[in-house]
């Protein structure tokens, strides 16, 4: 009896390993250079979904569970940096709020919880890096650009709606078709993405 090819939904793929390593290194680099480590983490986090979902056809929920574990490791590095700002406890509260959404994701297998429990922790961290790049103790009772932080939070709300409502319903399938057309036209590339999933 001939072996039936497995569906291409496994995370056990060299591209996934490479992306995982890149994201872990970027998270560690946050402790060395918070600004550029965060920039790299954001770039890798954005691109991994586009490539892994598009090329490997990993299921949306499986990707999210993998992605959120790596996200949390990045958050820990960012939280460590907030100690140098003297704002550990406020940031810990924002992280705890986000973590509730992650716990609900693992329990109920639905990403829509992130619309409610948005990643405001990371928005606040970006705000710290932009307006206090020296990474030194700050006084939250002193005048701060709170209006900019509010705009960051508002942006994140719409971003979570896009990522966890619009994208899985309307954006992901057309993107997969586009990526498969582009990469699978090249025989060598197409073979790499399909052979390890047989």
Image (cartoon, helix red, strand yellow):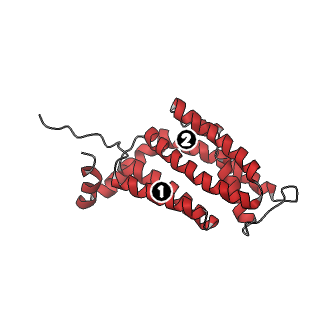
- 38 with respect to 185 (left or right): right
Compared to 127, does 4 lie above or below?
Answer: above
**Which label's residue is closer to the chain start, 2 or 1?**
1
Badge 1: residue crowd in 10 Å (few <14, some 14–19, many ≥20):
few
x 64%, y 42%: residue: 98
In the drawing, what numbered circle is on residue 191? Answer: none
- Which residue is under mark 2? 164
Q: Secondary structure at mark 2?
A: helix
Q: Can see residue 110? A: no
Q: Quadrant of the C terminus?
A: top left
Horizontal and vertical percent for residue 65?
A: 48, 41
Compared to 195, does 132 lie above or below?
Answer: below
- Which residue is under mark 1? 47
Horizontal and vertical percent for residue 179?
A: 37, 53
Q: Secondary structure at mark 1?
A: helix
Q: Quadrant of the N terminus?
A: top left
| Quarter of the figure with residue 18 | bottom left
| Quarter of the figure with residue 115 | top right
x 67%, y 42%: residue: 96
x 28%, y 46%: residue: 197
| Quarter of the figure with residue 126 | bottom right
Horizontal and vertical percent for residue 188?
A: 24, 61
Q: For the residues marked 2 and 1, what is the alpha-carbon distance in whole angstroms?
A: 16 Å
Instruction: Give 165 or 42, whichever is nearer the viewer.
Output: 42
x 55%, y 61%: residue: 28
Instruction: Give 48 or 103, whichever is nearer the viewer.
Output: 103
Report the residue that reaches farthest toward the bottom: 134
Q: Can see residue 105? A: yes
Horizontal and vertical percent for residue 53?
A: 41, 48
- 32 with respect to 16 (left or right): right
Badge 2: residue crowd in 10 Å (few <14, some 14–19, many ≥20):
some
């Amino acid at each position: 009896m001939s072996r039936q090819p497995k569906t291409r939904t496994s995370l056990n793929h060299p591209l996934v390993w490479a992306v995982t390593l890149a994201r872990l290194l970027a998270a560690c680099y946050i402790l060395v250079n918070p600004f550029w480590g965060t920039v790299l983490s954001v770039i890798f986090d954005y691109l991994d979904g586009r490539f892994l979902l598009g090329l490997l056809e990993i299921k949306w929920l499986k990707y999210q569970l993998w992605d959120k574990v790596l996200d949390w490791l990045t958050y820990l590095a960012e939280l460590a940096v907030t100690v140098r700002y003297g704002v550990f406890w406020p940031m810990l509260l924002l992280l705890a709020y986000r973590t509730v959404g992650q716990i609900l994701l693992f329990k109920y297998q639905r990403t829509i919880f992130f619309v409610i429990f948005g990643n405001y922790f990371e928005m606040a961290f970006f705000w710290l890096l932009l307006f206090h790049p020296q990474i030194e103790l700050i006084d939250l009772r002193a005048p701060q650009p709170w209006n900019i932080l509010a705009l960051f939070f508002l942006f994140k709300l719409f971003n979570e709606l896009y990522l966890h409502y619009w994208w899985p319903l309307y954006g992901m399938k057309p993107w997969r078709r586009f990526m498969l057309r582009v990469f699978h036209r090249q025989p060598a590339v197409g073979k790499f993405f399909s052979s390890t999933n047989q």
